Image: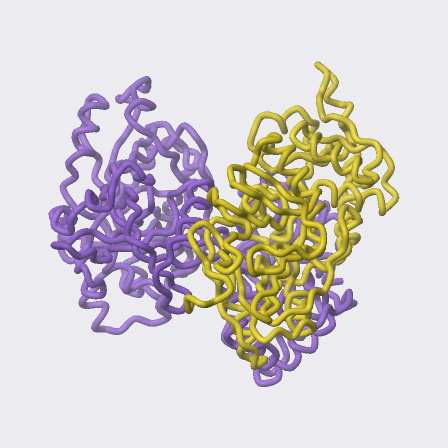
Amino acid sequence: MIAGFAELLERLAFTPQRKRKLAHLVQFFATRPDPERGLALAALTGDLELRSVTPSMLREMVRARVDAELFAISYDFVGDLAETIALIWPGQGAESNAILPDLVAELQVTRKADLPARIATRLDQMRPTERYAYLKLATGGLRVGVSARLARQALAEFGAIDLTEVEEIWHGLTPPYTELFAWAEGGEKPVSAARAPFRPVMLSTPTDLDALRPLDPAAYLAEWKWDGIRVQAVAEGGTRKLYSRTGDDISAAFPDIVAAMEFEGALDGELLVRRGDQVAPFNDLQTRLGRKTVSRKMLGSHPAALRLYDVMLWDGADLRDQPLSHRRAVLERAVATLDPARMDLSALLPFDNWDALAALRADPPEAVIEGLMIKHRDSPYLAGRIKGHWFKWKRDPMLVDAVLLYAQRGHGKRSGYYSDFTFGLWDGDQLVPVGKAYFGFTDAELRDLDRFVRNNTVDRFGPVRAVAPTRVVEVAFEGLNRSTRHKSGVAMRFPRISRLRDDKPASEADRLTSLLNLLP
Amino acid sequence: MQTDAPLIPRPEGLYCPEGDFHIDPVRPVARALITHGHADHARAGHGAVMATRQTLDIMALRYGADFAGSRQIADGPTRINGVTVAFHPAGHVLGSAQIALSTGGQRITITGDYTRTPNAACAPWEAVPCDILVTEATFALPVFRHPDPMEEIAKLLASVRAFPDRAHLIGAYALGKAQRVIMLLRAAGYDAPIYIHGALTKLCDYHITQGVALGDLRPATVARGRKGDFAGAIILAPPSAFAATWAQRFPDPVIAFASGWMQVRARARQRGVELPLVISDHVDWPQLTQTITELNPAETWVTHGREDAILRWCALEGRSARPLALVGYEDEPE
């Protein structure tokens, strides 16, 4: 029954503890049959391909049953399309006797033109929690507080098998993963059909000077943390793949990189847009992301390059058990054989003590640097975020004190609260909007800000409320770019509200000129 | 709003010029009419207060006997300056009332907070015919269709059976929600002792004196080293207690919260709730629209800041409606 899957989603949504989430998943895998459990797993990992059901199709369907404006107001409050539809859909329905495999098959084979009517009939026959699960399934992207990795970990726990082994074969398997469950229940390990598979990436934990002090600087290597996207380039047996750090195949968007992957192995690096020696701002890379094809013009104007950090496999040898110092030596020899326009080495930084490193961090040579990476010379290449081997030491954020101008209800975790804020700085005697932030505050501060918005609204523009310009907040951000899309002429990276400055009157908020002075 | 309007929203609260009184003022005023005892509606420090006997009792319990200069029990229609006022049950919490005004040939009903779902802890809501309906709109969105509270209690009891080693900690406001949940548990046949946080004691005791049979209530205090005593127990506490170390005294607690907001997942998650119980003391969307349809007022005024959807619904139904901008009321007061 869809009710079983609905109950699982419900439990996962309301279980904050990771361990208990795992327990719920393991129990589901242990009690549900194939192929239901495998389809549920695929839904959780985002591997269930049901591309024909789009959010706009669902909106259209609802419009036939519910006034569009009432729906819009409700969606604005609930913040999740599937949940809004599940709750607002007329009628209370009844417990559905449809089973997950049938529902999935129906969504896969029904012609697109017939889907809305099919889905509407199903919704009529379901209760709200089942509608929610069904719509989540249909649209993909469950966002129920379970990462793909956690779902795979639950499978590993269920079968008492090694998570790394599961992750390595994962990209070669397809839903409903019957052979994977057979393995988990004591059968043969499936042979991955994928060539050049993704290998789980090694991640770092944050650090600072106080945490570094007790460590021996001689035992560590340091390099810049570049502000691109972390990727894995795998070339094996004639197959070449470029993966994001979560294992998404992004090869199609980067043919220039793929063409330069003249090697046999797996490399770990940062994907950047680089013109000669000049690394372009993250903005430039963003225009290349998420494309199915890339024009020749864009390949010329936004050339991609890899800056290499590490090597996992080389010429048939798996180097992940080797110490970093050894992998680094292999990497240096390897890079020398590759096209320098597309692949170069992330340079090591010379330092004798942590203060020297702190001085480097305080004054990075390029704006496209996010901070430092500090890695133990002996560290093996481990899957995941394992403490004690690799550290990131990010730059201090930039700060301005700004005045809240507009607010909008948030989505997802913050839905129902006014949590998306537009803030401004003084330009003469005018406040000019300079950015938007929707996190950084604590839950208590969020409730405070929400109340402030509701009690100080001076105007409304659809879902947006203008508030009396009296409240000052400290905004922290990671960098600043020029932008033609913003009225102020600048765009902040990663802005968040780091503090409520109720000690400051609006007149003492910062001026636009002081922000512009921070431009690189 | 024109100045000869029978009611005017002011920073202090809703003001009736002809009667020269405020309804549920959020700041001290000379004369206040109070719908019910929740802290954001019933504040201390007014000159004269008129409310139901139970609301006056509750205010005295909370603020001390000298919470106002003078007080008057609402008892049948009463004339205040040129206005006749009468109090009618609202079904929200013990003592809660709607206030009916009659002035210049116009009948106005101010609902205060209300629900039409039966509540064994207080008198049921009454329909009060009117020309102008001033209604609350806490849950005035079509997504709010609160389920039968007995289904929610069944969910709670199923969880208690499934986790006999864990304590079930239910967040419920001290006035109204706590007693409502206890009465629902009793109606479901749960006759074991129910444990309550110290902050609930006074109001639970008061309910018992008013004939609300809450059954066997015990203080949720742990004698040293006897944490296991609460395995399988149901414990009620105000939500604020959950943030404190107070909650840590119970064995591996299941955190539940009884509120109409629990219908929306993000709200429940924001509160760290493991077992959301959709139990509301306010009208949901079907009840609100039903009330407007049945009373069929010439005008509907909407309070509480979440008025957009019901104004739209009124427009679709060809009904005259407008928002009343009042500030200072919480979504669900403590």
- Above/below status of A379 relative to A122: above
- How is the model colour-coded? by chain
Q: Nearer the viewer, residue A7 or A394?
A: A7
Residue B195, position as x, y percentages in the image: 75, 30
| Res A151 visible | no
Residue at x 63%, y 80% (from the top left corner) = A110
User: Which quadrant would residue A288 be assigned to in this image?
Assistant: bottom left
Q: Quadrant of the N terminus of chain A?
A: bottom right
Q: Nearer the viewer, residue A504 or A54?
A: A504
| Res A435 visible | yes
Q: Nearer the viewer, residue A322 or B264?
A: B264
Residue at x 23%, y 67% (from the top left corner) = A299
User: Which quadrant would residue A99 be assigned to in this image?
Assistant: bottom right
Q: Would you say B88 lies left or right of A354 here?
A: right
- Above/below status of A113 relative to A279: below
- Above/below status of B232 relative to A484: above
Residue B76, position as x, y percentages in the image: 72, 54
Q: Nearer the viewer, residue B2 or A230?
A: B2
Residue B85, position as x, y percentages in the image: 63, 57
Q: Would you say B258 lies left or right of A420 here?
A: right
- As drawn, the chain in purple is A
Residue at x 23%, y 23% (from the top left corner) = A354
- As drawn, the chain in yellow is B
- Count the marks: how many? 0
Q: Would you say A55 lies left or right of B60 here?
A: left
Residue A400, position as x, y percentages in the image: 22, 44
Q: Residue furthest top?
A: B224
Q: Residue furthest bottom?
A: A113
Residue at x 72%, y 26% (from the top left corner) = B220
